[in-house]
Amino acid sequence: MNPLPFPARFARPGWLLAGALFLLSLGGSWALFGPERNGAAADADDTLQVVYHINADDPALHLNALRNLQNHIDGSGMDRLEIKVVMHGGGVSLLQYANEEPDLRATVDTLKMQDVRFLVCGNTLDKRGIGLDDLYDAQPEDRVPSGIGELTRLQRAGYTYIKP
């Protein structure tokens, strides 16, 4: 059996359908990942919203995470960032250790002066019997009902998630 000549081979309905699907997939990818999403072009001057997630009871990790956060600010400019740190589980100890550790306390103070918000999980505080007065510079507005719930809410609101 002789193969069909070149033009007749591409006249088959299967080839047309495959080609059309391929072209549609390219257009769909561009719509998802191209420079314009939701009808608005991305602006280089937009505020970047970021949430850092801390849930480990490790003072060295805490200090390292906060130094990374400062590097993030230094690299992007604090006027372009909106940063929140959500702590739950063992991560709540970051503000407990800050009561005792001068380097950690100074780093928290420096970040707060740059409008970084430190949010603590109310579930963790209740379960462990920790009061806001046991945490360094924690205020009632820093308490969220659920750390995981807050992470979910912030991500749905467009915050970029970072787990140091």
Image: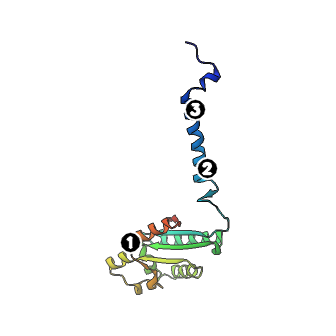
Callout 3 crowding tier (Cα within 10 Å): few <14, some 14–19, many ≥20 = few
- Circle 2 SS class: helix
Determine the CA span between mark 1 and mark 2: 40 Å
Is 141 positioned to the left or the right of 43 in the image?
left
Q: How many marks?
A: 3
Q: Amino acid at mark 3?
A: Leu
Q: Closer to us: mark 1 or mark 2?
A: 2
Q: Which residue is mark 1?
A: 89
Q: Is residue 56 in view from this perspective?
A: no
Task: Tell me which label, 1 or 3, sits earlier in the chain.
Answer: 3
Disc on the earlier residue, 2 or 3: 3
Q: Identify the residue position indicated by label 2 in the image.
A: 30
Could you classify mark 2 by the number of other residues whose Cα lies within 10 Å: few (under 14), some (14-19), or many (20 or more)?
few
Front disc: 1 or 3: 3
Disc 3 target residue: 16
Name the outermost residue toward the right.
44
Say the numbered circle drawn on residue 53. Answer: none
What residue type is disc 2 on? Trp
Q: Amino acid at mark 1?
A: Gly
x 48%, y 65%: residue: 156
Real-space Cα separation, disc 2 to disc 3, in angstroms:
21 Å
Callout 1–callout 2 Cβ contact below 8 Å: no
Which of disc 2 and disc 1 is earlier in sequence? 2
Residue 148 horizontal/vertical position (percent): 41, 68
Q: CA distance from mark 1 to mark 3?
A: 56 Å
